[in-house]
Image (spheres, helix red, strand yellow):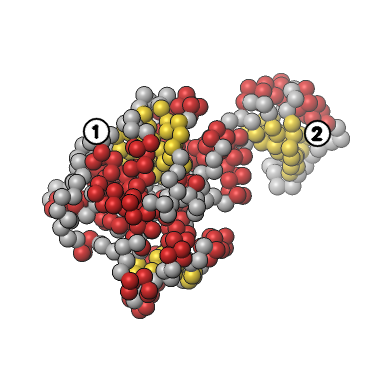
Amino acid sequence: MVNLSGMAAHAPGAVAVCKKGGFPLRPGAMTDLAAEAASLLTLDDVRAAAARIEGQVVRTAMDYSRTLSQITGADIWLKFENLQFTAAYKERGALNAMLQLSEEQRDRGVIAASAGNHAQGLSYHGTRLGIPVTIVMPRTTPVVKVMQTEAVGGKVVLEGESFDEAYAHARKLEAELGLTFVHPFDDPHVAAGQGTVALEMLEQVPELDMLVIPVGGGGLASGMGTAARAIKPDIGLIGVEAELFPSMYNRLKHNDLPCGGDTLAEGIAVKEPGEFTSLVLRKLLDDMVLVSEASLEGAVSLLLQIEKTVAEGAGAAGLAAVLAHPNRFKGRKIGIPITGGNIDTRLLANVLLRDLARSGRLARLRLTLQDRPGALFKVMGLFDAHNVNIIEIYHQRIFTSLPAKGLITDIECEARDKEQLDELVVSLKAAGYAVTQVELN
């Protein structure tokens, strides 16, 4: 694998990255280093990767979404990378990197630190190619992710309480055992493999004039951006990060927003973006936008309801950006990769229910009642009159500031839409009940 400390001139005749957008460098920044980084990732590299991995990964579908286009005011084309065998684009870069190993490196094996899609992609293709794969994961990794990685042939080593500790242990094992480390994003071979997504998108829909790409460490955006900018120099390139993890956003825009938290988009929850990828993206991206957790949840829900496809939080980040910033994207022909579909089923259920709550179809109404026979029955009559379905009822008598004969009742209910729910609330208040609606953030 190539890293920044080992940069070398690229092969003669390589197609250089075309420069349309890009972020300003700090005064005195190393522009020579940035140029050298760009020379390590070219359209020729991405095309070579495409030829190398052809037939070994899925050439995923690229479909126009009429409904999402109507909602957003843009022409939305979706690239279904969640339909790869491991349900994520990551296997493209992992495979491209492994196919360039020497025989000695293949025999010794590869190692990586990952608790996500990179682990599964590397393990699946390594096993398929007869290359031993070791994945170091934090001890806090959910059991299901360990099992998924082992199921496709990876050997999992649990070490440390955080990703940083797992990463450090992986580099230690790399040196001790003579393994080859395959970085999940900060490597030109990996980024070139990820760039094949853009090659396919522009072959499938040549009229695209903008790509909206999720960004974590930057490998996908570097590869896709390099290929797209060289093929269509005027194409718009927008990177997307979760508001809780604006690491690349901070680096490119010279900001210092806080970075951390429990995001739905764990696949792009990176505290330190790649050094190589940062240099490449500084010259490629037109801009970066941040998306809230609510926007990510809404995008995951819409993709399931409208496109009947399962996306993880990071996989839906591109659509979340277009939904959250409609004026920025209106009228454009936009390609969005659905980068992955590995989401826990219980978490997906929570996301869908929370989206129903935001739309007004589910609600929790909090009422103050008198603790006497028939009090709840009278309230139920109003729910029945408005044809609002009651799901659950919670009584709280002890831990309240009300008098001893008072109680707080939370009623979870299901309505046809927000208007029907609002009419119920009006009727409850008209009947003398104190009503508040428990809101989601």
Identify the residue at image location x=62%, y=39%.
Answer: 353
Identify the residue at image location x=42%, y=24%.
Answer: 73
Q: Where is residue 389, by image quadrant?
A: top right
Q: Which residue is mark 1?
A: 234
Q: Position of residue 304 (x, y in %)?
A: 56, 38
Give neighbour class at mark 1: few <14, some 14-19, many 20+ (Cα, 10 Å).
some
Q: Where is residue 290, by image quadrant?
A: top left
Identity, as a three-letter code, of the amino acid under mark 1:
Asp
Q: Which residue is mark 2?
A: 376
Alpha carbon separation for disc pair 1 and 2: 64 Å
Observer-nearest of 1 and 115? 1
Depicted 109 relative to depicted 340: above or below: below
The reply to whether discs 1 and 2 touch (Cβ–Cβ < 8 Å) is: no
In the picture, the quarter occupied by the N terminus is bottom left
Observer-nearest of 171 and 416? 171
Q: Position of residue 277 (x, y in %)?
A: 28, 52
Identify the residue at image location x=73%, y=28%.
Answer: 388
Depth check, mark 1 against mark 2: the one in front is: 1
Identity, as a three-letter code, of the amino acid under mark 2:
Leu
Identify the residue at image location x=34%, y=37%.
Answer: 202
Residue 268 located left or right of residue 32: right
Q: Residue furthest right?
A: 373
First along the sequence among labels 1 and 2: 1
Give neighbour class at mark 2: few <14, some 14-19, many 20+ (Cα, 10 Å).
some
Secondary structure under the numbered disc 2 in the rendered image: helix
Residue 279 located left or right of residue 109: left
Picture mark count:
2
Residue 426 located left or right of residue 64: right
Q: Position of residue 305 (x, y in %)?
A: 57, 35
Secondary structure under the numbered disc 1 in the rendered image: loop
Observer-nearest of 20 and 402? 20
Residue 261 can be seen, yes or no: no
